[in-house]
Image: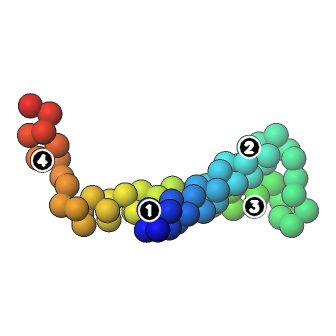
Amino acid sequence: MSRSLALIVLFIPGIIAAFGIKLMRDALFSEFYPIFLHTGVQFVAGLLFFIAGLGFIGGFIVYRDRKRQKNKEQTKKMDK
């Protein structure tokens, strides 16, 4: 149950980040959404969505690694 919950928690920010990439791409190719006032506003909103989604996923991974006490020194010992 907890693994599926963690998957859902990571899936939603991934969708938000993908939507941010789509907004930025559409702004570059002048495909305009009517809810935004200008293509520049659309690009900035897409950039914020992308950064927020990516930041959440990265923070989740860092938190999980710290919780399990994994760091660079342990991975170097395991590689040898």
Report which residue position mark 2 lands on.
25
What label sits on residue 74 in the rendered view?
4
Name which of mark 3 and mark 2 comes first in the sequence.
2
Report which residue position mark 1 lands on.
3
Name which of mark 2 and mark 1 comes first in the sequence.
1
Hey, what amino acid is under mark 4? Gln
**Residue 64 in view of the camera:** yes
Percent position of residue 76, x then y: 13, 39
Q: Are dots 2 and 4 in contact, CB under 8 Å?
A: no
Outermost residue toward the right in this view: 34
Q: Nearer the viewer, mark 3 or mark 2?
A: 2
- The count of marks equals 4
Determine crowd level at label 1: few under 14, some 14-19, many 20+ residues with C-alpha closer than 10 A: few
Q: Residue at x 86, y 67 (%)?
A: 35
Q: Residue at x 18, y 61 (%)?
A: 69
Hey, what amino acid is under mark 3? Val
SS label for mark 1: helix
Report which residue position mark 3 lands on.
41
Q: Nearer the viewer, mark 2 or mark 4?
A: 4
Percent position of residue 60, x then y: 40, 63
Outermost residue toward the front in this view: 1
Name which of mark 4 and mark 3 comes first in the sequence.
3
Name which of mark 1 and mark 3 comes first in the sequence.
1
As drawn, is 57 to the left or to the right of 74? right
Q: How much space separates mark 2 and mark 1, taking CA atoms?
A: 33 Å
As drawn, is 3 to the left or to the right of 15? left
Q: Quadrant of the C terminus?
A: top left
Name which of mark 1 and mark 4 comes first in the sequence.
1
Q: Nearer the viewer, mark 1 or mark 3?
A: 1
SS label for mark 2: helix
